[in-house]
Image: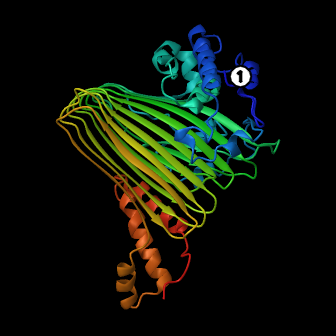
Amino acid sequence: MTPILQQGVDFAARFAAAKDRLPGAGLPWLASAREKASTDFERQGPPRSRRADWRFTPVDAVLGTDFEPAGRPKSHSGFAGKALCPLTFHRLVLGNGRLLPERSRYCDLPAGVSVSSLAQALQDDPGSLREDLGRDLSAEGLPFACLAAALFGEGVVVRVARGARLDRPLHLLLACDDTESGRPQMAHLRLVIILEPGASLELIEESLGGGRAPFWTNLLTTVRIGAGAGLKHYRLQRENALGSQTSATLVELGRGSRYESHAFSFGGALLRADLRVRLAAEGAQCSLNGLCLVRGTETADHHTVVEHAAAGGITRELYKAILDERGRFVFDGMVHVKPGAQKTDASLYNKNLLLCDDADVHSNPEFRIFADDVSCKHGGAIGRLSSEAMFYLRSRGIGASDARRMLVYAFGSEMIERVSLEPLRESLMAALHARMPEAAEETA
């Protein structure tokens, strides 16, 4: 068995010390699930570069930091004002992994929609969470997901009843800031999203970093979408230079259901996002979209696995990255078409724009196909700005710097234009402008 004592955090000792105080500690089934998750993490060991799926991810900086469990932030009055989402949306704010009721607003929900903190849900109706919180993660190969399942101290539960829909998007703001101790902080969270047949939801999950001490958020999300239901899931990462996030999102789709994911990364020392989508029943559809702007010494790493387990499924996947300075982007996307998943229609693409020689991209889109009546396409591209396009703009009297910015903006804005929520789309366009990498050199 691999010991899990690191130079930074002894996770086994942390779990042993905290397990009797964690939410739901009095529930035997949950205590057992936490113990198993801790054991699974210990068995797998923390991810290191020797593992093929982590070889390009500089996770040692996270594992080597002596994080302590996050305390209440010293100041949280400005969290909502810094968010990209309008204040008119339903809003749930977690500061340093703790629910902030005074900053949240979700009491006027329509019939059939319930939103609560995970700790409260475990008090009110723990049995309804057993399928999700008791889930065996040992076969997923996601060590940080096991760690979150063992150590989660808070989270959010969203349920949408059969045929119900939320009148406005739900904005989940995960904000972090310094505590009184001033030490590095970590928060392990779980999100549980359940849509019954015919239900509909738009969910915006925004991570907002602040403070002068390192902060690590480790997030595990499980999503169950019933027959004919639909979820639009927007994930916005806006960590500061000391903020890191590791996340695992596990989605299961019922017959004729739809999952639409939009991931935007506008900052953070390390972002590692694992997204697993299983099209479990006939006619399910998923659309996975991503845009990352990476600069400095930042790393953004997206691993996606889409499993077509039934016939007639549709997948559309496109991730883009814009890299400047010494930024690193990793994309590993796999679509698995299982035997019997005939009439699958899937496409998988990754496109990357390099603005300087020191930027680093690792792209690996792939298919594993075990059915013979399918339509599957995939591809990847890594390149620079088009010299022909630059010449065209310069010949129209546009300066070199402005021309480069126009081309970079055009490359990235395609992904933002896919966002159907107009207020969010406008905020993302503004964030793209603010985050726009400066030209590494002028083109004469």
Horizontally, is 415 left or right of 248 in the view? left
Q: Where's the N terminus, which quadrant? A: top right
Residue found at x 39% / y 66%: 411
Residue found at x 81% / y 45%: 182
Up the image or down, 266 lies above or below 170; here it is below
Up the image or down, 178 lies above or below 1; here it is below
Dividing the picture into quarters, in which one does residue 117 lie? top right
Q: Residue furthest right?
A: 181
Dividing the picture into quarters, in which one does residue 151 lie? top right
Residue found at x 49% / y 12%: 127
Dividing the picture into quarters, in which one does residue 64 lie? top right
Q: How many marks?
A: 1
Horizontally, is 385 left or right of 246 in the view? left
Foreground pick, 79 / 344: 344
How far across and how far down the image is residue 188, in percent? 63, 32
How far across and how far down the image is residue 282, in percent? 22, 28
Horizontally, is 182 left or right of 159 in the view? right
- The amino acid marked with disc number 1 is Phe
Residue found at x 70% / y 47%: 177
Give the labeled residue for mark 1.
Answer: 15
Q: Residue furthest front?
A: 50
Foreground pick, 303 / 168: 303
Up the image or down, 149 lies above or below 130; here it is below
Can residue 92 be seen by looking at this rendering? no
Q: Secondary structure at mark 1?
A: helix
Up the image or down, 192 lies above or below 106; here it is above
Q: How is the image coloured?
A: rainbow
How far across and how far down the image is residue 131, in percent? 46, 17
How far across and how far down the image is residue 141, in percent? 51, 29
